[in-house]
Image (cartoon, rainbow, N blue to C red):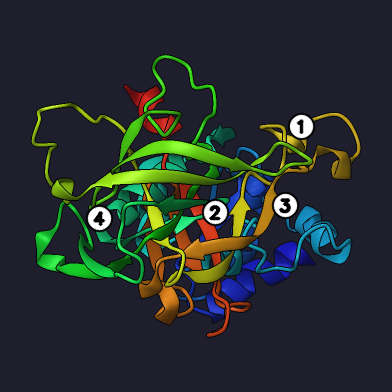
Amino acid sequence: MYDFAHCLSDSIEKITHSICTLEFENNRPLYDWFVNELIEGPKPQQIEFARLNLSYTMLSKRRLIELVEGHLVGGWDDPRMPTVAGMRRRGYTPEAIREFCARIGVAKNDNLIDIALLEHCVRDDLNERAPRAMAVLRPLKVIIDNYPEGQVEEIDCPIHPQKPEMGTRKVPFSRVLYIENDDFMENPPKKYKRLGPGREVRLRNSYVIKLVSTMKNESTGEVMELHCTYDPDTRNAAPSDGRKVEGVIHWVSAEHAVPATVRLYDRLFKVADPAGADGEFATLLNPESLETIHDCYVESSLASAQPEDRYQFERLGYFCTDRKDTSPERPVFNRIVSLRDSWAKMTK
């Protein structure tokens, strides 16, 4: 009955080419027989191609239903889902998806496409269009002891460093900042180029600072804040005495930063081919496919970020304002993709 209805509905709906997956190849003689016996005029043609299989995910509707109905994901538009709604909420652009489809083409043999290629297409597209911004996901307080108290400067930062026509944005700079916790190490190795005892780094688009001392939690020994000095002659300029400062880190002004929630998404499954793997379906899920960080800070220009706005958070990756959960009081950003491109390395 399916074969009978298939060709007739194709004809009624004026389908010229009915694209099917390979399991329908055996049905084609019956499809063609019904077409020739029952249809006058233009006849639809059935053509079979291999199903698209994407690594570290699942495209079977039956399996996706299990994920949704079993509450293993947040719904059909969960940003980890390989659905149009999920990819849109994640922040994938239509242009990147079309480029991915053009690159993989169609085939007659089943194969597993590396999801890294899709991520590469997304990076390529967003690198051209996404405005830059600074965000600190795991904040560590920095106090610049020799910076005047109460003073605030506006730093001109490029919206896109390779596209001057996009203009600049104003980022406030003050005595108390937040930097990324990972950008400080108490006992750094020799080639470490970030902040450590007696070390200097440049704050992105602004000054060179030097670590003087740390303040620790008395009970845990955890470093709670850093005390630094700054060189006032180094605002977007090299030190006048010729010394080299190699490390560059991002920052936000503590007084002006906007509190935000950031969701770090990773691959949904921990095995490349979950459809062919042994074990219970649920046990193949990646337990680290979502990390939610609540105590983040983003630069003040993102206070007006709208749902589905996309940015490159400098040194961190590409992020999209969540279309459902973000609010004027607290924006929520979904990581679209990290900056590291494993596919580009493989192609080299």
Looking at the picture, tell me which residue is in the foreground, 4 or 10: 10
Which residue position is annotated with label 4? 128
> Gap in Å between the C-alphas at discs 2 and 3?
35 Å
Q: Which residue is drawn at 63% across and 62% down?
A: 295
For residue 60, the mark is: 3
**In this orientation, which residue lies closer to the viewer: 88 or 100?**
88
Which quadrant of the view contains residue 4? bottom right
Vertical arrangement, residue 101 with respect to residue 84, above or below = above
- Give the x, y percent position of residue 73: 77, 60
* Cβ atoms under marks 2 and 1 closer than 8 Å: no
Question: How packed is label 2: few (under 14 Cα within 10 Å), some, or many (20 or more)?
Answer: many
Nearer-N-terminus badge (4/1): 4
In the rendered structure, the answer to whether residue 308 lies left or right of residue 148 reads right
- Reading the chain from its start, which is encountered first: label 4 or label 2? 4
- Neighbourhood count class around disc 4 (C-alpha, 10 Å): few under 14, some 14–19, many 20 upward: few
User: Could you tell me which secondary element the residue under label 3 belongs to?
Assistant: loop
**Rendered image: mark on residue 137:** 2
Please identify, in this view, whether the residue under mark 2 or under mark 3 is nearer the observer: 2
Instruction: Give percent across and percent down for residue 275.
Output: 75, 38
Identify which amino acid the numbered label 1 is placed on: Gly
Gap in angstroms between the C-alphas marked 4 and 2: 24 Å
Q: Which of 154 and 15 is in front in this view?
A: 154
Q: In this view, does 156 lie to the left or right of 100?
A: left
